[in-house]
Image (cartoon, rainbow, N blue to C red):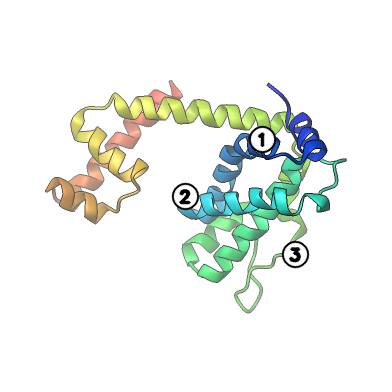
Amino acid sequence: MASYREMTENFLETRSDADFTALFYRIKPGLTNYVNKIVKDRDMAEDIAINTLTKMWTKIDQFNPEYQITTWLYRIAFNDALAHINQRKKKSSLDSLSEFGVELNEGGEINLGMAGAFEDYEMKTEQDFLDEDDLMMETYEKTLKAIDGLKDLYRDILVDRLINNMKYEAISEKHGLPLQTIKNRIRRGKSIVAEKVEA
């Protein structure tokens, strides 16, 4: 499998749709998961990742090939994610940024200029990104397999919650069960899945 650098060099040389598409789909899974950790919204994470990767085509002349394409793209995505959260103003999402070293100014605005917020990703090598992508895909596949192996009373509800991203109330209405029963089964189902994935 070609490395990120090799694929980037091919795209820079050819500027072809095929080389762009190959690089786009190689980077997208890891980038989307990274953004999702920040915005806590899978659909929005997908949108931000796609917009970021589109800039790989429209603004590639701004990229310095001495560096990794992933460092450049993750920085763009990070800033776009912060801008989205700043606009959305959801306290839960703002609180979740603390793990990235992001703080709020006195006016409640996100400080986009914080130098430490992106240090970990600037220090990562291409192999680090590849290893993370492999681990993410392995965990994702093991999780899906574990969910599929659950008893019906857990599986269907967990699929609705984790994969279909349905709200608890909607799941309760769909299955005709009390809300607390739904929450209990989701909690128990997650516990079973976690045990299987970690085994």
In the picture of the structure, the residue carrying the numbered disc 1 is 18
Mark 2 and 3 residues: CB-CB less than 8 Å, in contact?
no
Q: CA distance from mark 1 to mark 2?
A: 27 Å
| Of labels 2 and 3, the one closer to you | 2
Evaluate if marks 1 and 2 touch, with contact meaning CB atoms under 8 Å apart: no
Point out the residue furthest to the left here: 176
Mark 1, secondary structure of its residue: helix
**Vertical placement of 199 versus 74: above or below?**
above
User: What residue is pinned by disc 3?
Assistant: 113
Q: Relative to 3, does residue 163 appear above or below in the rendering?
A: below
Residue 154 image position (x, y, % from top left): 23, 34
Q: Earlier in the sequence, mark 1 or mark 2?
A: 1
Q: Quadrant of residue 14?
A: top right
Q: Is residue 101 visible?
A: no
Horizontally, is 64 left or right of 28 in the view?
Answer: right
Using the image as rendered, state which of residue 144 and residue 196 is in the foreground.
144
Residue drawn at (76%, 37%) of the image: 11
Q: Quadrant of the N terminus?
A: top right
Q: Position of residue 44 (x, y in %)?
A: 50, 55
Residue underneath mark 2:
42
Residue 103 x/y as whole percent: 64, 64
N-term-proximal mark, 3 vs 1: 1
Query: Residue at coordinates 62% horizontally, 61% vertically from top-left?
Result: 82
In the displayed image of the protein, which residue is found farthest to the right?
A: 66
* Residue 28 position (above or below residue 174): above
Q: Amino acid at mark 1?
A: Ala
